Image (cartoon, helix red, strand yellow):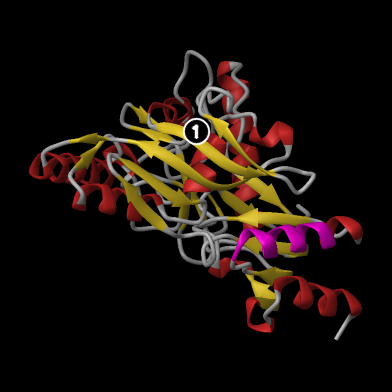
Amino acid sequence: MSDFLLRLTKAAKDPERIKTGEPMKQHTTFRTGGPAAYFVSPSCTEELSAVIKLCRQEHMPYYILGNGSNLLISDKGYEGVIISMEEGFSQIQNEGTRIRAGAGALLSRIARQALASSLTGFEFAAGIPGTLGGAVVMNAGAYGGEMKQVLISARVLTGEGEVKAISGEELELGYRTSCIQREGYIVLSALLQLQQGDKSSIQARMEELAEKRKEKQPLEYPSAGSTFKRPEGWFAGKLIEDAGLKGFSVGGAQVSEKHCGFVINRGNATSSDIIELCRQVRDRVKDQFGVELEMEIKRLGEF
């Protein structure tokens, strides 16, 4: 066992929380990606802080992982530490009309708990395939709703290892952005303000949005959701379709025929297929319309 692995095991306090050579295709919604050198699932803030401190001391790269729903990992894998928040930071609890949840809690689970408590305001997030931490970082939204509308505050871990609460206003939430990336914060949990509502109406709204997603999005295939950010004054999917790229494929990766804003894994795609397809799509759209598409999906590893 390497010296780093021994120290990582000590920081995480449990050898069972650490894996080596973990296939990342098992942890991303694209279902692609090579192995992570180290994969650790801290159970609390103290362990998380200790793992990050070790990585920084050893100049070992690390990445905070939620549900892997907005992420493309290189086929070569990741020569660093993947820190998964799903296991140790997934608690959800009610506080009257508020819900406090950990960064690793799935948005779908939070929405179901809100429904069970007859709380409205979070229906928009029920079908977003991500965790609360990622949703706060990116101000996730859908169908007219966004995190900015319900977020009271977030608890974060700073680069200095300090835990602090930041109000929704201080987070500077905008379209797919917040101050968290700029400041190097890690979301630990968040407090959401919902409203008392009618349970049957909440259920009906969730079912309505689920049906819309099923009708318009390629949910039957692995993907990372919307592949490109919305260019100002345009819609990425419309530009891609108008460029004649509906169904366009590279290897096992394809522009969805149901919604051109989605790149899907037809079953045997590699991350290289996906990144090459996206490159060609960007070039074609730029050539035809003069619009520069920007990928919404984060890339990790060597491409």
Q: Horizontal placement of 243 versus 277: left or right? A: left
Q: What residue type is labelled 1?
A: Asn
Check the image and name the residue furthest to the bottom.
1
Which residue is found at the position 76% from the left and 62% from the top? 50
Residue 253 versus residue 35: which sits nearer the camera?
A: 35
The percent coordinates of residue 243 (x first, y second) are 49, 28
Residue at 54% x, 70% y: name it: 26
Tell me if 10 is positioned left or right of 192 in this view.
right
Of the 4 image quadrants, the one containing the N terminus is bottom right
Q: Which residue lies furthest to the front in this view?
A: 96
Residue 232, horizontal then vertical, whole percent: 52, 15
**In-image side of 251 versus 58 (left or right):** left
Kindly tell me whether residue 219 is visible in this rendering.
Answer: no
Asked if the magenta segment contains residue 262, the reply would be no
Q: Main secondary structure of the magenta part?
A: helix
Q: Over which residues does the magenta segment extend?
A: 44-54
| x then y, percent, for residue 263 | 49, 46
Q: Is residue 51 magenta?
A: yes
Q: Residue furthest left?
A: 200
Q: Which of 255 and 158 is in front in this view?
A: 158
Tell which of 130 and 292 is nearer to you.
Answer: 130
Residue 12 is left or right of residue 143, and the answer is right
Residue at the (53%, 26%) spot, across then down: 173
Seen at 72% across and 65% down, the residue is 77
Q: Mark 1 points at which residue?
A: 139
Viewer-side residue, 253 vs 72: 72
Residue 62 seen in render: yes
Secondary structure of the residue carrying numbered label 1: loop
Q: In this view, does 96 lie above or below 178?
A: below
Relative height, residue 232 to residue 45 (above, below): above
Could you say where residue 188 lies in the image, as x and y percent from the top left? Answer: 57, 50
